[in-house]
Image: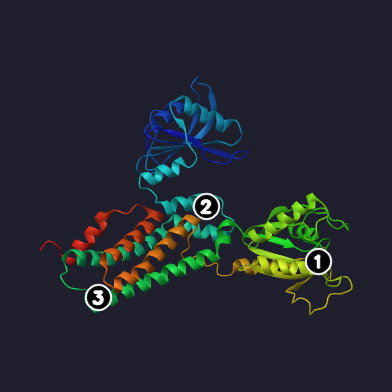
Amino acid sequence: MDNDTISAIATANGIGSIAIIRISGDRALEIAKKLTHKKDFSPRYATLTTVHNKKNELIDESIVIYFKAPYSFTAEDVVEIQCHGGFIVAQSILKATLELGARLANAGEFSKRAFFNGRIDLSEAEAIAQLIEAKSEDAAKILAQQMKGSLKEYIEDIRDEIIHILAFSEVSIDYAEEDLPEDLVKQIESKLSDLKSSLESTLLASRAREGLMQGFKVAIVGKPNVGKSSLLNSLLNYNRAIVSEIAGTTRDTIEEQVKIGTHLIRIVDTAGIREANDEIERIGIERSLEAIQESDIVVALFDGSRVLDAEDEQILALVDKHTKNKHVIFVKNKIDLENKFSTEDINFDLELNSKDSVTSLIESLKNIMDVNNNSDEIMLISQRQIMAVQNTLNNIEESFYPLQDQELEIFSFHLNEAVKEMASITRPFENDEMLDKMFGSFCLGK
């Protein structure tokens, strides 16, 4: 990693009360002194001072805080300048830092430096990135815990246990003249089984709650003119979609965000699904099918004022085909009109009038999203982490067979691979760790 001093605006673009410019590197304090004409700054003290550019022109009166290495986010010297928010002031101060020798930071470079300097591990870095884009309060709580190292501790515990088992195998390969005692094999199998159960539980919980991290996606589907757009407008509480008695008015998917309970969700109003009359409508229907496949929850809407027909049957077939392992809410709409829909046709979860009140649907969506959202439970927050744990689990499962046959080289190979996979979530695997455990546990060298 280079030794450049980097600088960037750490707050979002736009007009606000304050903006923060962050400088990190060996020259951070030097640049801050030149900007402010001050001789020194006390670490961790907020100092109100004027800020000037290279031409000595006044830019702003700001608060400057100096964090002396290694007691900063990046573990380098860091200076944060809190100036008045806006488009011009922050950019002017940033430009001044660059003129005085800083380099514009790359995306994620502050976190990258924190990782390389041992301030955070990869799991904490990912938690920081995802916390910024958290789609629910529960997700924010989980990510905040991971920033404090909860996932790191879990990974380290699993990793240490695998290394400990691996130490038994390595010692036996190098020093044992006879086969492993049967009771020792059973002990190792028991430990591996416990690890397997723990990893399976974590994977299951993480996959079941992916929507919690990425944001739940809800698709509203139905044949033309059943009230999908009216339902979307009611959920958003404003007229986002055009509502018309003409079938096929919505010819493409419409996607909007709305907060339900503690969750920020994406709702997709799909084009009415039927036999397409033209190319544009056909493309819209194809996108509707994609929306169903990509969604976490499907709201299947039917018009209670019309009898079940072939288009309704088509919707039922598509929902059945494309919603495996998804939540589906069957809704009868237009209950203010004469009911012509037989209750035997579909077992409806809800009955409502989408132009009137959708409170019951909001409650149903909230209940689905709130299930099993225990923020105290360990959870993997990215596909990278999920794949690493899955690969670890695969290697542990593969290790049972050579252990039973006492093919210890192959057994050790699988456990080494498992350790590397777990290490990839937090930090690289160092073979010295295993050697320390071996010597400590078995007094090698006697």
**Residue at position x 65%, y 58% from top?**
265
Q: Quadrant of residue 410?
A: bottom left
Question: What's the residue type where badge 2 is placed?
Answer: Gln
Question: What's the residue type where badge 3 is placed?
Answer: Leu
Of 173 and 361, the residue lying toward us: 173
Q: Single out the mark in the foreground, 1 or 2.
A: 1
Which mark, by number, is residue 166?
Answer: none
- The residue beneath circle 1 is 311
Q: Quadrant of residue 137?
A: bottom right
- The residue beneath circle 3 is 184
Of pointers 2 and 3, the one earlier in the residue sequence: 2
Please say if 345 is above or below 268.
below
- The residue beneath circle 2 is 130
**Residue at position x 35%, y 44% from top?**
117
Query: What x and y, as percent, mark residue 76?
Result: 37, 39
Q: Single out the mark in the foreground, 3 or 1.
A: 1
Of pointers 3 and 1, the one earlier in the residue sequence: 3
Query: What x and y, as percent, mark residue 422?
Result: 38, 59
Picture quarter with the C terminus? bottom left
Q: Single out the mark in the foreground, 2 or 3.
A: 3
Query: What x and y, as percent, mark residue 411?
Result: 30, 66
Is residue 90 in view from this perspective?
Answer: yes
Question: What's the residue type where badge 1 is placed?
Answer: Glu
Separation of marks 2 and 3 at Cα, in angstroms: 43 Å
